[in-house]
Image (tube, coloured by chain):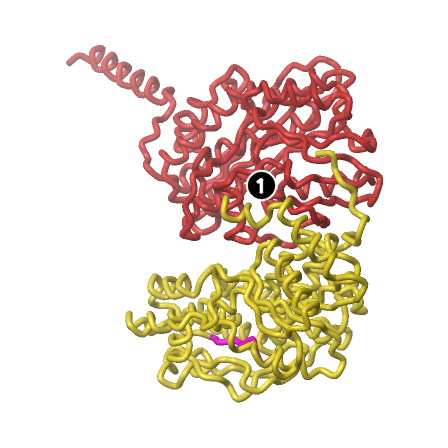
Chain colours: A red, B yellow
Amino acid sequence: MTSADRAFAEAAVQARIEAFRRRRPKLNDAHITTAHGAGGKASAALFDSVFLQAFTNPVLDLMADSAVVPVAAGRLAVTTDSYVVTPRRFPGGSIGDLAVNGTVNDLAMVGALPQWLTAAFVLEEGLPVDELRGYVTDMAAAASAAGVTIVAGDTKVVPRGAADGLYITTAGVGLIPDGRRLSPSSLQPGDRVVVSGPIGDHGIAVLLARGDLALEADVRSDTAALNGLVEALLSAAPATRWLRDPTRGGVASALNELAVAAAVGVALDEASIPVRQEVTAACELLGIDPLYVANEGRLVAVVPDAELDAALTAMRLHPLGTASAAIGEIVVEPPGMVTLVTGFGGARIVDLLVGDPLPRIC
Amino acid sequence: MKFVDEFRDPVAARRVLEEITALAGDTPRSFMEICGGHTHTIYRHGIERLLPETIDLVHGPGCPVCVIPMGRVDDAIAVARRPGVLFTTFGDMMRVPGGTGTLLEAKALGADVRMVYSPLDALRLAEMNPERDVVFFAVGFETTAPSTALTVLRARQLEVTNFAVFSNHVTIVPPLRAILESPDLRLDGFLGPGHVSTVVGNRPYRFVPERYGKPLVTAGFEPLDILQSIAMLLRQLDEGRCEVENQYTRCVRDEGNPRALAVLQEVFELRPHFEWRGLGFISQSALKLRAEFAAWDAEERYEIPGVRVADPKACQCGEVLKGVIKPWECKVFGTGCTPETPIGTCMVSSEGACAAYYNFGRFAGRGRIPVASG
């Protein structure tokens, strides 16, 4: 071989190496290790193979230190939430669905049009990569269904035992259309309280999915993005006063917060509150009141009496609101309290829950 | 839930209420519901508001969490803190304060305390964790005692040696007798406990009409059961009868459950005396594992401090449990003592009279709760 030939061959090898180095590294690992959090090739491989593949969009694909997005003038809604559910997959959804829908719903409840999400993952060493990929796929599907884009993210790996598998934190940004104002201060006595469907499905589905109660029932989580339903409601009932997604603490806690914030009473009628038979039965057995059980795809709205029929009609036409019902009304006395006329004809207050009768569920 | 709906039918309720109103007349009557489950039903369904004003419901001592003295909670915490111990308890007991804090606090500080729904779950934990010593904090009347007894028998059969029971089981008749002996008694009759009676039957209550001249009706737990039982008590008073009657016939037989009683008899014996929260020491009122089950008895296996802790001075749980005062008449009710920071046990369990009143009953006075248009 001449020296020229040798130089040529060497250059070809070096070019091959360079080309190979320029290729993004492939992820061949079955489990998360600390290497995936070290910021090197393993991190890049995880990002490419799991996150970018699922979430790809022009903003995220730039992989800049910050996502840069255009906005018109007006008001933004910003929110953040962490998700730590056990088990991570349950009938009707997964931690990935919750991480998108929960944050989208927090934006929708202030009347915002959800636009962008960020997602941060705390991964415990040893988490199967395929399991992670499953949740990330769920997130991508949920984001697509809700019409939002995941524009930035972060991943950290902690040693085995320092976290419970996987925690996800998402932040969300939404645009609030001009003139839209939802606030407890707009409440009037005589306003009606509406719920968008049967309550308690999510909490009971997760509780039963843990499998330590020796109870079985066909209950699925209601996790869903509510921004579409909110838009349907607000166009039919533009004077809607207030919205809330009754997650942790359930409908009872959401309405208690409203009663205190607005210094009004909330009078509920137990007989008209929709609850699935399976949920009622599980709650009876466990000594839990469905009013305190978490929901992840329901909303509670307060609408003026004059717009009640329009609101219910519009909500019932939407796939996520077919079982919407009026469950109570805003009253003057007693202020700051939620009261309930029971299905039996008696009456009681519905106070804030003390402590946590259920292990964490959202 | 069809089965339950039938007992929550407002139309049927109205019929019984009409009968109650007709029978009640103008004479003020006080009835005690002995069982905490009844207290919970009464408040949860807002029954007080439905009754004529002349009828006063007094909440009795039948809440297993409420009658556990502070010293026993401290004993439980001492066991839970031992190295190697996996301590299991019903959820309600987690927040009951002893003199040195709660099990929940002990858990936060490193004790392995876990909530279970049944003693069999605790036994299963013992089988799954052979290197740990699993202890079950057994509380309750004759309702829950048979399941503890059965679990001990199962542990013996399966030769599970890393399992022990810290028994705080109590019996229903002695405190009932203590209440009837109380000089400030002002009751006209009793709603007898439902679940306990499925085990012990109706016969143990005969002394109530026979010796103390008060009628007793064993009652179920649905709101309609409560109303029917009140009607039955009024009917007895109206007709000049005084006896033990059974409203809860779908579950309770006069002779009780002989198999459950036999299991209780096999595993437990009566303690000479036991301290009750607010009621003091009552002789022959609690259950201890028999000597042949000493291997599964936490009190035999571990050194139990057994320190007596005086109830906090401000706490009037004793008077509440005896029905001498209403929860809201207690000096610290709702201020010093709330469900978030309970001083007394009656404020902890959802069956406790104070917690039930605080959580459901405030503002429930007649006519104060507005009716929603739904």
- In the image, is residue B89 part of the stretch drawn in magenta? no
Q: Position of residue A47 (x, y in %)?
A: 44, 28
- In the image, is residue B171 part of the stretch drawn in magenta? yes
Disc 1 crowd, CA 10 A, few/some/many (<14, 14-19, 20+): many
> Which chain hosts label 1?
A
Q: Position of residue A334 (x, y in %)?
A: 82, 45
Q: Which residues are magenta?
A: B166-175
Q: Secondary structure at mark 1?
A: loop
Asked whether residue A222 appears in the rendered view, the answer is: yes
Q: Nearer the viewer, residue B172 or B200?
A: B200
**Direction bottom: furthest residue:** B272
**Direction left: furthest residue:** A1
Q: Residue at x 69, y 65 (%)?
A: B234
Please, is residue A210 above or below residue A295 in the view?
A: below
Q: Amino acid at mark 1?
A: Ala
Q: Quadrant of the C terminus of chain B?
A: top right
Please, is residue A214 above or below residue A148 in the view?
A: below
Residue topped by disc 1 = A294
Q: Nearer the viewer, residue A84 or A279?
A: A279
Q: Nearer the viewer, residue B246 or B154?
A: B246
Q: Nearer the viewer, residue B262 or B312?
A: B262
User: In the shown orientation, is residue A206 left or right of residue B173?
Assistant: left
User: In the shown orientation, is residue B225 left or right of residue B88?
Assistant: right
Q: Position of residue A274 (x, y in %)?
A: 59, 35
Q: Residue at x 74, y 68 (%)?
A: B30
Please, is residue B45 above or below residue B273 in the view?
A: above
Quadrant of the image occupied by residue B109: bottom right
Please, is residue B277 above or below residue B122 in the view?
A: below
Q: Residue at x 32, y 37 (%)?
A: A30
Q: Position of residue B95 (x, y in %)?
A: 61, 63
Q: Residue at x 50, y 65 (%)?
A: B89
